Image (spheres, helix red, strand yellow):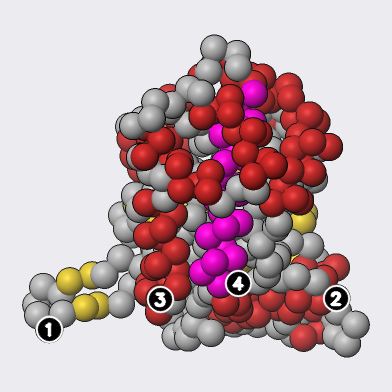
Amino acid sequence: MASYTTPWITPPETSKSTQFSLSISTVNYADTPPNILEYYSSDLEGYRNFVTARNEFNTMTFHQFLETIPAEAKHLFDPLKNTLSAEEQTLSIVQLVKSDKIHWGGDNQTEDRPNAIRHSGTFSRAFTFEEVCRWYSDVCSQYDEDLKKEATKYLDGNIELVKIGIMVYDVLCNHIYQKHSLSNVRTQMRRETEEDENLYQFQKFKTIIAPQLNSNDIVAVQESLDFHALKTTSWCFKTYAMPSGKTAINGTPGSKISILLNSSVAKHTKLLDTPTISEHMYLKKTSCFSVKIRGKHVLLVVLHMKNPKKDAPQVSTDLKTLIQHLKGQTSEPYDYDIVIGDTNLEAKNKFTPADMATSLGLKKVDNICPTTSKKRTWAQGQAEKAETESLEEKDACLYSDNLTVVQHTLQPEEPNTGTNSIYPNLSVSYLPKPSWPSDHLALSVLFQETPKPTV
């Protein structure tokens, strides 16, 4: 379990301090992906079988693949085989995928296919060839509408080649999973029963959220669970995981956002109605709260935006309109505005969290480090993205100028490597990983009220 050093302890509600302070944290709790082998972190280097599996996955030729298929079933792949020259059949499947000779794009258009790698987080065995065939015979047609769109876009409408392409992927994954005993990789991240799932979430909560709760007034959680509902046969999550005196308030219905805070503050906190953005493509998960704490009134806006890409400037304008609307709906003026959470902004789209702050007329906490750091492994369906990294500052905190940032931290902290104490090399710690099973860092901020200028 990751260790955590409390960066500060905020004043209790009974503090007699005359200067207002507030500590707040944001973290995307993140649904643990069903494919626990999809993203790289350094722990994978300890599994030799994962490395040998990668080599075979990347080098198996189409001809070698057909040799693994029962003789009576080889004909299932004839429509694809007939599109490949004899020379192409001696090339690796992954190479054929990258050169558009085999299409795996349909992988994202279905959900429950019998693929051991896709479901490595909830299954510890490979699916048999017979189980794969049965799914394509009995279930696959349920996804025909989406697969037809995939075929029209990429394969001149040939849905058969779409289905055979992802069937190749499924059979290959099951073969590799079984042959290389991948069931023993990251076993601590697997949950095969409801009890396993709840115990896993218990440990995850203690690792990711509890440290933030111990050192912050408010923790804003995206991709949140209903923490109060988690139970096992022997313990209640609320009793054994949630720190004493803390409680959760759910955000907008369907948003999977919640804020966790002191029970005493929760009595003076309410979720605000936001009907003007309930259907907004990018902002509909946004949850806004009125928080009264230490004699001050805070408008807290928690974001979990869908990536707006080129529409980011307009989305920011729409968010500003929402904030102005909310501020006009109360008879008790807000002392401070805080916008915090997962913006899902990407640098390539030329609109950063700093740009959003400017658009909203707010300041941005001075973090420029990536809050997400992913690197896909070979064990995922987008061959062209394998072994590529993505570093983005997605999580941000924006605030009104009558607040001052005393300190901000990211958790978990990046380890230093090398011996140069003046210019240490920072090693990239890719997420998620067993010791931090979220793909986002937690951003914590300590605010104080900005002193009013003396006359």
Distance between the Cα atoms at labels 2 and 3?
Answer: 36 Å
Q: Amino acid at mark 1?
A: Thr
Distance between the Cα atoms at labels 1 and 4?
Answer: 37 Å
Please indicate, yes or no, whether residue 284 appears anywhere in the rendered image: yes
What kind of element bears circle 3?
helix
Name the N-terminal-most of marks 2 and 1: 2
Q: Which mark is residue 169?
A: none
Distance between the Cα atoms at labels 3 and 1?
Answer: 28 Å
Distance between the Cα atoms at labels 2 and 1?
Answer: 47 Å
Query: Does the magenta segment cover residue 169?
Result: yes
Where are the magenta residues, as a range?
160-183
Q: Nearer the viewer, residue 12 or 68?
A: 68
Q: Nearer the viewer, residue 9 or 297?
A: 9
Q: Is residue 163 above or below residue 73?
A: above
Name the N-terminal-most of marks 2 and 4: 4
Distance between the Cα atoms at labels 2 and 4?
Answer: 27 Å
Q: Nearer the viewer, residue 174 or 294?
A: 174
x, y percent for residue 293 = 65, 66
Residue indicated by mark 3 = 48
Q: Which mark is residue 419?
A: 1
Residue indicated by mark 4 = 183
Name the N-terminal-most of marks 2 and 3: 3
Q: Amino acid at mark 2?
A: Lys
Q: Amino acid at mark 4?
A: Ser
Q: Amino acid at mark 3?
A: Arg
Q: Which mark is residue 231?
A: 2
Q: Residue shown at 56%/52% (left/top)?
A: 68
